[in-house]
Image: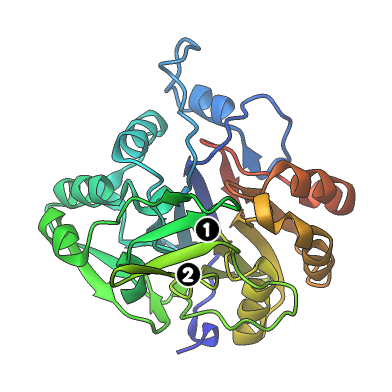
């Protein structure tokens, strides 16, 4: 099943429920609404205060709603690092959790799946029924980041499919791609690695028996894509451990449609900062009209993007809404 099986949608509405950054002040183009302006216009912030605005937290959660005529379908991609942050921000932003049609977990890291159990429970309770939840079988191993001195940042384990089912999920555990939401969304399968410079995440390991083994490629990672009519493919890549150029290459090849926008974490921070120039050069070849990096992208990469992409660049921040 390929991206060519997607049915084009008329428009997209993307709400950032969780991200590392809060930014209610920066100016934005007309198709992007910053958090504070959006809350004020919706009557959800009578008085500006710390209680009235969202919390930034290391992680990502995107609410993606596709419209085709009178039809609409909504997918939650990831749920951030913890349930309290997801639920608090969703309440402040007025998210109708009962209206979410499916949940997609991009890969098996705590900053994307730590809030998943709470999110699934809230959605299933709101809709009074199971919520289809798309997972990869490789997401549930114990993982860690090995530091240069040999010490480890050991990652929180994600809830397994059984726990998620108990909370109200209907787990769909597969390596294969899928078209969901009445043909409006495509979940990629495992992402081919075709560039020479995107070699995964150095120092990333996973538990195998009693030992840690190298796991730089993080093959359980997948992306979400939507075809917007007369514009092109919009790609949501939550962490881009596969490399964002590999991700958009796959999307464009599978869809045979130009890239319109790309959004999410590009993971060009820390020990992947060395590939920033090659990555941005690779992205330029696709000429995205909307570039919305956030989460793990890093300030060095954002600084270079600002010089290269100019008005196409609108960095992600919690509570920000993109109308595409």
On the picture, is 243 further left or further right than 117? Answer: right
How many other residues sit within 10 Å of disc 1, few (<14), some (14-19) or many (≥20)? Answer: many
Determine crowd level at label 2: few under 14, some 14-19, many 20+ residues with C-alpha closer than 10 A.
many
Residue 231 seen in the figure: no
Residue at 76% across / 50% down in the picture? Answer: 301
Give how far across and how far down residue 144 sits, in percent. 43, 57
The quadrant of the image that shows the N terminus is: bottom left
Which residue does the numbered mark 2 point to in the structure image?
Answer: 221
Which of 55/163 is in front?
163
Left or right: 131 as drawn, with respect to 111: left
Task: Report whether 30 appears left or right of 7.
Answer: right
- Rendered image: mark on residue 238: 1
Residue lying at the far front in this picture: please name it. Answer: 149
Q: Is residue 171 above or below residue 167?
A: below
Q: CA distance from mark 1 to mark 2?
A: 9 Å
Q: Is residue 271 left or right of residue 164?
A: right
- Quadrant location of residue 166? bottom left
Quadrant where the C terminus lies? bottom right
Residue 65, disc = none
Please name the residue shown 39% across and 84% down the image. Answer: 176
- Pointer 1 with pointer 2, Cβ within 8 A: yes
Q: Of the residues under marks 1 and 2, which one precedes in the sequence?
A: 2
């Amino acid at each position: 099943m390929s991206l060519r099986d997607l049915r084009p949608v008329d428009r997209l509405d993307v709400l950032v429920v969780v991200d590392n950054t809060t930014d209610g002040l920066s100016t934005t183009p007309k198709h992007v609404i910053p958090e504070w302006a959006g809350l004020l216009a919706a009557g959800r912030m009578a008085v500006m205060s710390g209680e009235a605005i969202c919390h930034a937290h290391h992680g990502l959660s995107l609410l993606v709603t596709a419209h085709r005529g009178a039809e609409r379908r909504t997918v939650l991609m990831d749920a951030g690092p913890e349930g309290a942050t997801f639920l608090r921000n969703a309440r402040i932003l007025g998210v109708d959790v009962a209206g979410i049609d499916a949940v997609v977990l991009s890969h098996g890291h705590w900053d994307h799946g730590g809030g998943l159990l709470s999110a699934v429970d809230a959605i299933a309770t709101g809709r009074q029924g199971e919520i289809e939840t798309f997972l990869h079988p490789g997401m549930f191993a114990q993982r860690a980041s090995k530091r240069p001195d040999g010490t480890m940042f050991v990652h929180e384990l994600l809830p397994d499919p059984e726990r998620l089912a108990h909370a109200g999920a209907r787990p769909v555990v597969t390596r294969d791609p899928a078209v969901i939401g009445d043909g409006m969304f495509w979940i990629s399968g495992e992402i081919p690695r075709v560039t020479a410079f995107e070699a995964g995440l150095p120092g990333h390991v996973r538990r195998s028996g009693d030992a840690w083994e190298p796991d730089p490629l993080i093959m359980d990672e997948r992306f979400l894509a939507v075809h917007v009519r007369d514009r092109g493919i919009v790609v949501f890549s939550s962490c881009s451990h596969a490399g964002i150029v590999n991700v958009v290459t796959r999307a464009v090849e599978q869809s045979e449609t130009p890239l319109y926008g790309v959004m999410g974490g590009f993971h060009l921070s820390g020990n992947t900062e060395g590939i920033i120039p090659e990555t941005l050069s690779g992205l330029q070849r696709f000429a995205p009209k909307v570039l919305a990096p956030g989460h793990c992208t890093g300030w060095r990469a954002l600084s270079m993007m600002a010089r290269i992409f100019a008005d196409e660049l609108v960095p992600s921040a919690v509570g920000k809404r993109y109308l595409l």
